Image: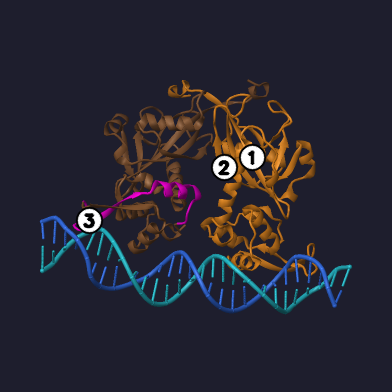
Chain colours: A brown, B orange, C blue, D cyan
DNA sequence: ACAAAAGTGTTGTCTGTACACCCATGC
DNA sequence: GCATGGGTGTACAGACAACACTTTTGT
């Protein structure tokens, strides 16, 4: 340790994760009933602490992995929340991350073990500390991101239909879209491959399944695109 | 202190600031020659540490104030840099902020006292640690932000001309713009008030000065706008 | 009178938006 | 055969992009 550094304070550094999922109709966030004080039994985001020997991003991945058993998940740093009084238990600075997972990938037994629940983002109960603020900021960030990157697909199963994809965008942006304009725009990006197979689970006629073209997907993910039409952003 | 928290590690939490300025032609960043080890005498962003009793945003404001004497500055959190090996002196997690100031507001004596220099963002020398990465990320964020918010004005003097404003956008986006389309677009936002006075410093004919209409400016700052035409984003 | 930068308009093209009907199928 | 959701095309309007000449004035 260099001399210059010794005089400074050391702080607890926490991670909080906003985990989004999509159930086919609604955008959901994963919340837990907090298992310890302060605020025991209140609704909370999942979280943990950053250890001395791990990087912050690394800690975030670990926290997500511990709770969901999932790795290689889309996850991005959101913001640092560092007000002195945000956690009444102690001075804790928290780095918030948001992640996108496929609901069906998340094993039921882990959910039960952690007392975790998927909650509609439009019907979120009161949360501890500043977690509600984190969630709202994450929603806003998700909107921003999805407007320029083909990110929404992280939330859908491998195969999905255009109506499903449209419902996802409608859930993210809390709006309604014209299906003709939607399909025109999305298909024009050239990142979807149509399959011969149809999904008959929600209509008699059935809707064609699509998968994405991972190559073009990656290109677009880097370069970004415009979904003004869809997102209104 | 709550029991549950005691077992966790405590870390040094630093602040680093990317401070942008505009000299009329080029976008610049404020850099200092580091006054202490490690990496003494190397180029660095300005920074400091977060104290036990201050919020993180508060610490960032303090650091900026100490260096520049300026308060009430546009400043936003950028990102947390938390790799374990980013600072060889010790484990330090750093929260980066970017700020926009008017170069002429920054008192010369403070610059000298802190060994600070304005450096063209296109000609940045090697920087300590991961500071270069911070700077690049800040530039990218500035581009994003300026595409949707009337933020560029934070960098200009009270009165400015359209050609000056255009140069600023050209510097931020490292591109060239058509002045006819530029003035059309900017004036259509309705946030500029034309003065009778002209600036003759760069041409015989002289260019009209403008100031912004603070009321509309604030509305747009909240709602956001689109400068696709200009920014290419 | 000329050099140097400021100011100003038009047109074609493209993109977005609004809108309505037929299709396929299970019951 | 009918009810349900899926799929497709067109026309109008507004925004963007490309482009060149005139104005002002200090020297």
Instruction: Give the letter of the chain under mark 2.
Output: B
Q: CA distance from mark 3 to mark 1?
A: 55 Å
Q: Would residue B180 appear left or right of B110 to someone viewing this image?
A: left
Residue A206 - label: 3
Kindly identify which residue carries mark 1.
Answer: B17
Instruction: Provide residue A61's location: percent of width, then percent of height.
Output: 43, 32
Residues packed near mark 2 inside 10 Å, few (<14), some (14 to 19) or many (20 plus): some
Kindly identify which residue carries mark 2.
Answer: B77
- Can the viewer see residue B161? no
User: In the rendered view of the protein, which quadrant contains the C terminus of chain B?
Assistant: bottom right
Instruction: Give the letter of the chain under mark 3.
Output: A
Residue C9, quarter of picture = bottom right
Q: Is residue B147 above or below residue B46?
A: below
Q: Would residue B20 appear left or right of B222 to someone viewing this image?
A: right
Query: Dot 2: what SS?
Result: strand
Instruction: Give the letter of the chain under mark 1.
Output: B
Residue sitting at x 36%, y 49%: A212
Query: Dot 1: what SS?
Result: strand
Query: Dot 3: what SS?
Result: loop
Instruction: Provide residue B176's location: percent of width, then percent of height.
Output: 65, 59
Residue A38, quarter of picture = top left
Mark nearer the viewer, 3 or 2: 3
Magenta stretch in the rendered image: A201-226
Residues packed near mark 3 inside 10 Å, few (<14), some (14 to 19) or many (20 plus): few
Q: CA distance from mark 2 to mark 1?
A: 9 Å
Instruction: Provide residue A52's location: percent of width, then percent of height.
Output: 52, 23
Q: Looking at the image, tell me whether mark 2 or mark 1 is earlier in sequence order.
A: 1
Residue sitting at x 63%, y 63%: B213
**For the residues bearing labels 2 and 1, Cβ distance under 8 angstroms:** no
Residue sitting at x 36%, y 46%: A121
Q: Nearer the viewer, residue C21 or A34?
A: C21
- Asked if both marks, 3 and 1, belong to the same chain, the answer given is no
């Amino acid at each position: 340790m260099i001399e210059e550094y010794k005089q400074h304070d050391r702080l607890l550094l926490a991670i909080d994760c906003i985990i989004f999922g999509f159930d086919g109709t609604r955008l959901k966030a994963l919340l837990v009933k907090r298992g310890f004080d302060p605020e025991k039994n209140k609704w909370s985001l999942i979280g943990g602490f950053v250890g001395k020997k791990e990087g912050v991003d690394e800690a975030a991945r670990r926290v997500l992995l511990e709770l969901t058993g999932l790795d290689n998940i889309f996850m991005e740093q959101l913001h640092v929340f560092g007000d002195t009084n945000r956690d009444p238990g102690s001075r804790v600075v928290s780095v918030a991350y948001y992640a996108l997972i496929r609901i069906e990938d998340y094993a039921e037994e882990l959910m039960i073990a952690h007392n975790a629940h998927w909650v509609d983002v439009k019907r979120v109960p009161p949360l501890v500390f500043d977690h509600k603020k984190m969630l709202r900021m994450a929603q806003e960030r998700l909107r921003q991101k999805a407007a320029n990157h083909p990110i929404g697909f992280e939330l859908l199963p491998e195969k999905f239909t255009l109506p499903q994809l449209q419902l996802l965008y409608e859930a993210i942006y809390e709006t309604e879209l014209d299906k003709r304009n939607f399909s025109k725009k999305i298909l024009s990006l050239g990142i979807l491959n149509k399959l011969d197979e149809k999904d008959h689970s929600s209509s008699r006629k059935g809707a064609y399944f699509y998968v994405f073209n991972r190559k073009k997907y990656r290109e677009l993910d880097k370069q970004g695109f415009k979904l003004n039409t869809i997102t209104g952003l």
